Image: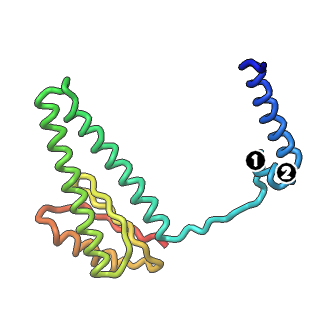
Amino acid sequence: MINKQNLWFVTLFSLILVLGIYYVSMDDEALATLAGDNTSKETIEVDESNVLVALRVASDEEMMQQMQSYQDILLDEASTLEEKNDAYESLQALNTIKGEVEKIEKLITETYNYDCFVKISGDNINIVVSSKEHSTEMANKIIRSVQALYDKQKYITVKFEA
């Protein structure tokens, strides 16, 4: 009669034997891949759209972290009423900023046919435009059209990425 200890020993020994045979029969290229010695050099082409995507992802992550922290304050029972009110107002401000960013990006895309990234912090508006042409005239047109959306003076910067 086979007891549990002998059954486990036979099972594990069989598993080790099968893995050992598999490892010995592998070719050198597959072993190098498993060991992490990948000697093949891959180059990644970065074009302007990838730069804009990276900027958007970083900005979205930052905004989501801020929103999560404000939501944590709102849901925390130990938070005071004043803290909850401040968190709620900050959450509304973030949503407003997100809407303004989308509106500016849509304006630039429709008016000037440029792909762009917009970041708003306070009175500063930073715009990164995907274009090989670095034109001060175009930057001035973009600044004027964005400033026309606001009654109050904003500090707008335009940067061209090629």
| Residue 5 vertical placement versus 152 (above, below) | above
> Residue 46 in the image: x percent, y percent?
56, 67
**Residue 124 image-quadrant placement:** bottom left
What label sits on residue 51 in the rendered view? none
Local crowd size for mark 1, using a 10 Å CA cut-off: few (<14), some (14–19), many (≥20): few
Binning the other alpha carbons within 10 Å of mark 2 as few (below 14), some (14 to 19) or many (20 upward) gives: few
User: In 3D space, how far apart are the residues under numbered discs 2 and 1 (Cα atoms)?
Assistant: 11 Å
Kindly indicate the quadrant of the structure image that contains residue 55: bottom left
Number of marks in picture: 2
Read off the residue under disc 2: 26
Residue 121 in the image: x percent, y percent? 27, 53
Q: Is residue 79 left or right of residue 45?
A: left
Residue 23, x across and y down, in percent: 84, 44
The residue labelled by disc 1 is 34
User: Going 43% across and 73% down the picture, which residue do you hit?
Assistant: 130
Q: Mark 2 touching mark 1, by CB under 8 A?
A: yes
Residue 8's image quarter? top right
Residue drawn at x 73%, y 61% is: 41
Q: Is residue 151 left or right of residue 113?
A: left
Residue 140 in the image, given as x and y percentages of width and height: 29, 75
Which residue lies at the image location 14% right of the left edge and 26% below the top edge? 80
Q: Which residue occupies the foreground of this view, 138 or 14? A: 14
Quadrant where the N terminus is found in the figure: top right
Left or right, 134 with respect to 127, comes to right
Nearer the observer: mark 2 or 1; the answer is 2
Which type of secondary structure does the marked residue at label 1 adopt?
Answer: helix
As displayed, is residue 120 above or below residue 67?
A: below
Q: Amino acid at mark 1?
A: Leu
Q: Tag 2: residue type?
A: Met
